[in-house]
Amino acid sequence: MIFVVAFVAFVVSFCPPALAQDASPKVTGTLSNVTRIESWSYFQPKVDPLALTLDPLADPTYFYLGDRSELGVRVEGTRFDLSGAFNYVRLENLPTTAIGPGGLGAGAFYFAAVGVRYSYQLYLSELTLRAKTRDQRMSATLGRMRYTSGGEYASAFPALETLKRERLHSRLIGGFEWSLYERRFDGLRVDVDRPAWHVTSSAFVATQGGYDESANLSMPKVQVAGATFTRKSSSPTEWQAFAHVYRDRRASAAVVDNTQSIDRPVDVTVAAVGGSHARVAATRAGELDTVVWAAGEFGDWYGQPHRAASLAAEAGHRWTRAPWRPWIRAGYLFASGDGDPLDDRHGTFFQMLPSSRKYALSAVYAQMNLRDAFVQALVEPGRVKARLDLHRVSLASGSDLWYQGSGATASTGRFFGFSGRAARGASSLGTVLEGTVEIPIRKYWSVNGYAGTMWAGDVVKGIFADSRLTVWGIDNVIRF
């Protein structure tokens, strides 16, 4: 919050004369509201044989309501841009008995953050000053902003940008957009753009948010820095090399790994180095797309050497001339796990601060210690957009944990940001069938739905009493 106050003072003193030098700056206002109802029927916890009751440990069936409003303004000039936004979030009917073992769906994590059945907050979600050259070839952005790994540069090809947005963005660092409180980043970003390439460097501290209502506050002990080099092309093709560093020294007493060690303050420093390739090629019937993403990690995990890796490879075809423009895709993800909890090495791939729901709509698992083989179908009947995914998921190592989450959400407390359940030697996590639909009602109004189910594998059956999870949600979206 100190950063925000200092920056506001800087904007007030500097921006009016700076923006006054711009001829006829463009002023844009934004207003949006998302109202959500979400229903969970998580796997049923087993009855504790040592307890004094035959009732389950927790109740996995519930629904909750949420609403997020945003009011923003953006001023664009030839040399300076200034933008800001406020959000108001309210949640009701949060479940009080949906924890154990672990959080049983998103509602459980919202409740764990506040300890009561409701949550609300008015907070500053954006405040940035962007200085740029007149030719737009260099810029520096300071303040509270969005940041998406893989999305540092936007090409002129809509099909390529759709592919990147759906299958490359936020694998390591993202805005946690599907949560009502979301996530932002306080810091500095510098971009250099040339005809053949684009370079971005950044240094941030993450804000609280996600499930935590204190979203005005930043987390000074959660620091991320990165650099990306994007090679452009005259065709819908893009290569990127990246390096991101995550450093976490929160006082939160939490250890989420397979060592079964006692909780202690977070002590994690991890660097991820890798690259990605995305391409859309024209065919007789439409467009063929390919995506490859890979990262290797090294660093320190609570005093242990950290070595891990992840790889994703995908391909698809869209029939652009056919009715409903069907798009069929398939792919495979591997994210390493830790095979031996007793050795002096941590081998679980660490996702840092991702937007997990982009790649697992149910958000029941994270891309850590995971093998995920999937097929996907997307159609566009008229202005409606629909997506259906089928995943077969298993753990890379049965000696590690089944992880879920989207990274750090608070500076204090006992929630690390990811949670995990012991696999006890099993590896099959389950089969997931899930889909979304976006229905535009008017120019500024749409209704979006999600539904998913998961059939349990051996990992889940060893922890829970039943073998099926279901979840659905509806968002009413108004955006001006």
Image (cartoon, rainbow, N blue to C red):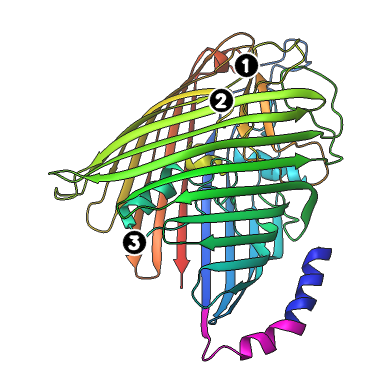
Q: In this view, does 377 lie to the left or right of 140?
A: left
27 or 442: nearer the viewer: 27
2 vs 3, front mark: 3
Considering the numbered disc 3 on the image, is that residue within a helix, a strand or a loop? strand
Which residue is labeled 2 in the image?
43
Specify which label sits upstream in the sequence, 2 or 1: 2
Dot 2 falls on a residue whose secondary structure is: loop
x and y, in percent, of residue 265 in the image:
86, 34
Q: In this rendering, is residue 134 above or below 471? A: below
The residue beneath circle 3 is 440
Quadrant showing the N terminus: bottom right
Q: What amino acid type is highlighted by mark number 2?
A: Phe
Residue identifier under label 1: 463
Q: What separation in Å lies between label 2 and label 1 (alpha carbons)? A: 9 Å
The reply to whether discs 2 and 1 touch (Cβ–Cβ < 8 Å) is: yes
| Closer to us: 354 or 50 | 354
- Choose between 193 and 455: the one closer to the eye: 193
Give the residue displayed 55% in from the left and 40% down from the top. 356
Residue 8, magenta (yes or no) = no
Above or below — where is 157 with respect to 72?
A: above
Quadrant in which residue 279 is drawn: top left
Residue at the spot 51% in from the left edge and 91% down from the top edge? 24
Going by the numbered disc 1, the residue's amino acid type is Ile
Name the amino acid, label 3.
Pro
**Which x, y percent locates residue 290?**
33, 38
Query: Where does the magenta region start and end?
Result: 13-28
